[in-house]
Amino acid sequence: MIRARRPLLPALALGLATAALAAPGAAVASHGGAASPPAADPAAAPVLCDFSLDGPVAGGFVFSNQVGAAGCVRVLVATVGGAQQVSVESVATTPGWTATVANRSGQSVKVLFNNAATGARAEAKVEPGKTAIR
């Protein structure tokens, strides 16, 4: 009985091609492609107050308050008619946070911060001589 010899190389190539088609993620990954979803982006770095901007200005004194990871509130204190008044100079928020100014000026100012994605909240209330950050 005579056996016909088959060439080994074509059979080996067919087997490798079949294996590559069966696992396309592995084949793509071995050539620099992404086989798994990318990792989640890290949380945004909080906006920080630039305290170097604090100090006397025309009409009063400006100071900053860091409101945790939510952001920064800058307040102007001025003397009007012999009494100190406060007003919101500026508000900066960390990405993902929003700010609502509840009281913009007068005897006190209040800024509410909200992060819709996490449900976190923060608040800054400033009166002459008294600041509360919650």
Image: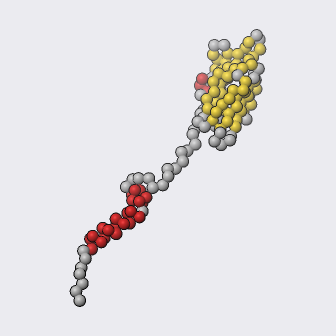
- Quadrant hosting residue 79: top right
Residue occupying the far bottom of the picture: 1
Q: Is residue 66 visible?
A: no
The residue closer to the viewer here, 76 or 93, is 93
Q: Quadrant of residue 47?
A: top right
Q: Is residue 48 above or below residue 28?
A: above
The answer to which of 124 and 7 lies nearer the viewer is 7
Name the residue at 58% across, 36% down: 95
Left or right of 82 on screen, residue 96:
left
Q: Splitting the image into 4 quarters, where does residue 104 fall?
A: top right
Q: Where is residue 89 drawn, in percent x and y?
A: 65, 21
Check the picture and name the quadrant holding the N terminus.
Answer: bottom left
User: Percent from the top left, x then y, of residue 14?
Assistant: 32, 68
Residue at left 77%, top 14%? Answer: 83
* Residue at image location 68% in from the left, 33% down from the top: 113
- Quick check: can you spot residue 28? yes
- Horizontal and vertical percent position of residue 34: 44, 53
Q: Is residue 27 above or below residue 80?
A: below
Residue 73: percent from left, percent from top: 65, 27
Screen quadrant of the C terminus: top right
How many numbered marks have been drawn onto this rendered protein structure? Answer: 0
Tell me, what colour scheme is on the image?
Answer: secondary structure
